[in-house]
Amino acid sequence: MDEYLEAMNDDMVAAVDALNASLAKVRTGRATPKLVDGVQVLVASYGTSMPLNQLATVQAPDARLLTVTPWDKTTIADIERGIIAAGLGLNPSNDGQIIRVPVPALTQDRRRDLVKQVKQATENSKVRIRQVRKEYNDMFKQGEKDGEISEDAMHRLLAKVQEATDAFVKKVDSVADAKEAEILEV
């Protein structure tokens, strides 16, 4: 049964990791290379769509600017179009060698919208954690019905599942609270 509990923990950790990944893409008014992690660039000369991080180096020299240095200078226009098409609200400009992406300050309305996005992602993560709890609770209850585990063992396992669920929900809340504070920071 310990193997099942470890697998359950892994599933819950995956839910928290997915939340962290989705929150990393939420713009906070500060420049960070993670902001453009999910950008796909249609490279005409290669005839394919590629992730930005496979075409260029992305850096944040200061809090309001990203610099994108393409490895192949012929892809500069494609990269610029890809950043615009990503819908991040960013306006890149290039000088033929490097693309500068200023990160504008957030308005109060935009901050509220981003907080709503954070809350939605947080709720999705909590739902996933609860689904994992239900899967394992059902598995342990079925094991008790099938005579594989005793009733006392089932109750102990259900208590452990609930403890893990509570701990991971707390972790999700703390991650979300930190991101909200970062967004609302002026």
Image (cartoon, rainbow, N blue to C red):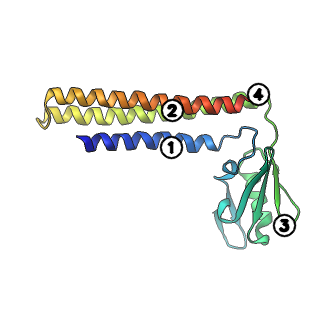
Q: CA distance from mark 4 to mark 2?
A: 25 Å
Give the class, few, some or many, for how many residues have Cα within 10 Å of label 3's Cα (few <14, many ≥20).
some
Q: Which mark is residue 172?
A: 2
Q: Which of the two labelled residues, at mark 2 and mark 3, occupies the earlier sequence position? A: 3
Amino acid under label 3? Gln
- How many residues crowd around disc 2 within 10 Å: few (fewer than 14), some, or many (20 or more)? many
Residue 81 falls left or right of residue 147 = right
* Separation of marks 2 and 3 at Cα, in angstroms: 41 Å
Judged left or right of residue 126, residue 176 is right
Q: Which numbered circle lies on residue 17?
A: 1
Q: CA distance from mark 1 to mark 4?
A: 28 Å
Of pointers 4 and 3, the one earlier in the residue sequence:
3
Mark 2 vs 3: CB contact within 8 A: no
- Who comes first in sequence, dot 2 or dot 1? 1
Which type of secondary structure does the marked residue at label 4 adopt?
helix
Kind of residue at disc 2:
Val
Q: Earlier in the sequence, mark 4 or mark 2?
A: 4
Which residue was labeled with disc 4?
Answer: 109
Q: Position of residue 155 (x, y in %)?
A: 22, 26
Tell me which residue sits at (33%, 32%) in the image. 134
Task: Tell me: residue 30, above or below residue 180.
Answer: below
Secondary structure at numbered mark 3:
loop
* Position of residue 3 in the picture relative to residue 132 (left or right): left
The N terminus appears in which quarter of the rendering?
Answer: top left
Residue 179, quarter of picture: top right
Q: Residue 6 is drawn in which quadrant?
A: top left
